[in-house]
Image (cartoon, grey):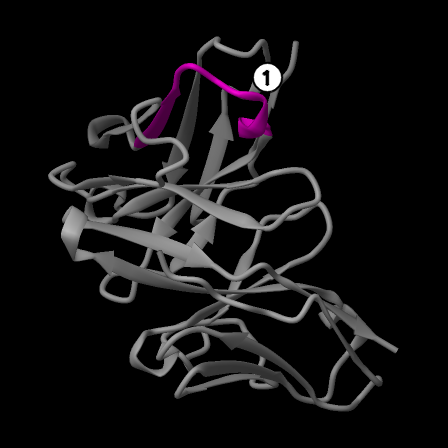
Amino acid sequence: SYDLTQPLSVSVALGQTASITCGGNNIGRKNVHWYQQKPGQAPVLVIYRDNNRPSGIPERFSGSNSGNTATLTISRAQAGDEADYYCQVWASRTWLDSRIWVFGGGTKLTVL
Amino acid sequence: EVQLVESGGGLVQPGQSLRLSCAASGFTFSTYEMSWVRQAPGKGLEWVSYITNNTTTIYYADSVKGRFTISRDNAKNSLFLQMNSLRVEDTAVYYCARGTTGSYAFDIWGQGTVVIVSS
């Protein structure tokens, strides 16, 4: 299997920049996607393929991916950005002729 | 409006079965890959199963393989998840999610349906 490691929590001051990391073996070779989930709501895709924003996602959200770490960066953090954030990749299991979709454990972002 | 609406969740005893449905609207359902993703209470997201647009390829997470079956009816814009031999650890909110072409992300999610497995 393939494991993704995220910090349990990240705090950021209002208006400052938050960085949420996602660690995985050679993750830089994979496409990484990021989701935002607020309490009681379904996840929302905020970054796809490392650094692309879907329509409607503010430019304050950006991503990078290299080596063993992918990073979601939220600039000028707002109270409304408080949420859980999950990274995700898909992995091929060639010995099983199968694919799996893997999520990180999630990071709770607190805006102070 | 692009929308996914799940239904079929409920409270069942261990060993029983349940069939979830997901109704799609606002897009050409037959051209998209789809998946089921679940979230246990207070836990993170877990991918469950995937199906291509024409049903030619299907994948399952190891935790559900042999017990769950994904299917779709493109004529009715619907996705299904047949869940047999349910276990307590299958308790979760189940989301259907639309796959993005080529990048294997999930760009549209339903609101989820709750499955509780308890004796």
Q: Position of residue B43 (x, y in %)?
A: 65, 46
Q: Look at the image and tell me in which quarter the N terminus of chain A lies.
A: bottom left
What's the magenta region? Answer: B78-91
| The stretch drawn in magenta includes residue B79 | yes
Q: Position of residue B27 (x, y in %)?
A: 32, 48
Of residues B63 and A85, the one drawn nearer to the viewer in this rendering:
B63
Q: Chain of mark 1?
A: B
Identify the residue at image location x=26%, y=46%: B28
Of residues A37 and A67, the one drawn nearer to the viewer in this rendering:
A67
User: Would you place residue A82 above or below residue B33 in this image?
Assistant: below
Of helix, strand and loop, which one carries label 1?
strand
Of residues A57 and A81, the one drawn nearer to the viewer in this rendering:
A81
Identify the residue at image location x=22%, y=32%: B74
The quarter of the displayed image where residue B22 is located: top left
| The stretch drawn in magenta includes residue A103 | no
Q: Position of residue A47 (x, y in %)?
A: 47, 73
Q: Look at the image and tell me in which quarter the C terminus of chain A lies.
A: bottom right
Q: How many discs mark residues in the rendered view?
A: 1
Side of A45 relative to B91 (left or right): left
Q: Amino acid at mark 1?
A: Gly
User: Would you place residue B28 above or below residue A87 in this image?
Assistant: above
Of residues A51 and A66, the one drawn nearer to the viewer in this rendering:
A66
Identify the residue at image location x=19%, y=43%: B53
Q: Position of residue A26 (x, y in %)?
A: 35, 79
* Residue at the disc numbered 1: B10
Q: Residues within 10 Å of mark 1 (few under 14, many from 20)?
A: some
User: Would you place residue B36 above or below residue A56 in this image?
Assistant: above
Identify the residue at image location x=15%, y=52%: A95
User: Would you place residue A22 above or below residue A91 in this image?
Assistant: below
Q: Residue furthest right?
A: A112
